[in-house]
Amino acid sequence: MFNTLFTAVAMAAPQATAQGGARNALATFIPLILIFVVFYVLLILPQQKKQKKHKQMIDSLKRGDKVITMGGIHGTVTHVGDTTVTLRVADDVKIEVSKGAIATIKQ
């Protein structure tokens, strides 16, 4: 009697998984998809927005702007090149820095 009961249960199990297999696979991936969406919204989008704003600020640099570099150097832009900027940091002291090193433009 127990032998036939175990045989019947064993034969019914593959049918149940075959019918719900697609649903189970989708249910398994939904949490992973939701985690990816949350990471995208909380981490990737704000970083892209910040990079876009910094690029616009770098592109708008002009002679006479007072800037602060990422290293904390305060200076006034005297020349804007393709990839570099020349800053006057004191009387008769000029340095050349990469455009990407400019952190902010002082108002």
Image (spheres, helix red, strand yellow):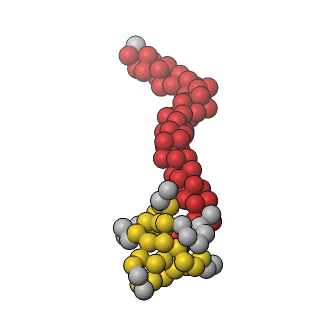
Residue nearest the viewer, comparing 80 with 83: 80
Looking at the picture, how far across and down is residue 77, in whole percent? 52, 73
The quarter holding residue 60 reads bottom right
- Residue at 44% x, 72% y: name it: 75
- Residue at 48% x, 77% y: name it: 87
> Is residue 70 visible to us here?
yes
Q: Where 78 falls versus 49 (above or below)?
A: below
Looking at the picture, how far across and down is residue 66, in whole percent? 49, 66
Looking at the picture, how far across and down is residue 23, in whole percent? 59, 28
Residue nearest the viewer, comparing 45 with 91: 91
Q: Where 19 falls versus 46 (above or below)?
A: above
Residue nearest the viewer, comparing 2 with 107: 107
The quarter holding residue 1 reads top left
Residue nearest the viewer, comparing 59 with 29: 59
The quarter holding residue 55 reads bottom right
- Residue at 54% x, 78% y: name it: 78
> Is residue 55 visible to us here?
no
Q: Where 64 falls versus 50 (above or below)?
A: below
Extreme residue toward the bottom, this view: 92
Task: Indicate left or right for 107 with 3 as reference.
Answer: right
Task: Indicate left or right for 1 with 57 as reference.
Answer: left
Q: Where 79 falls versus 9 (above or below)?
A: below
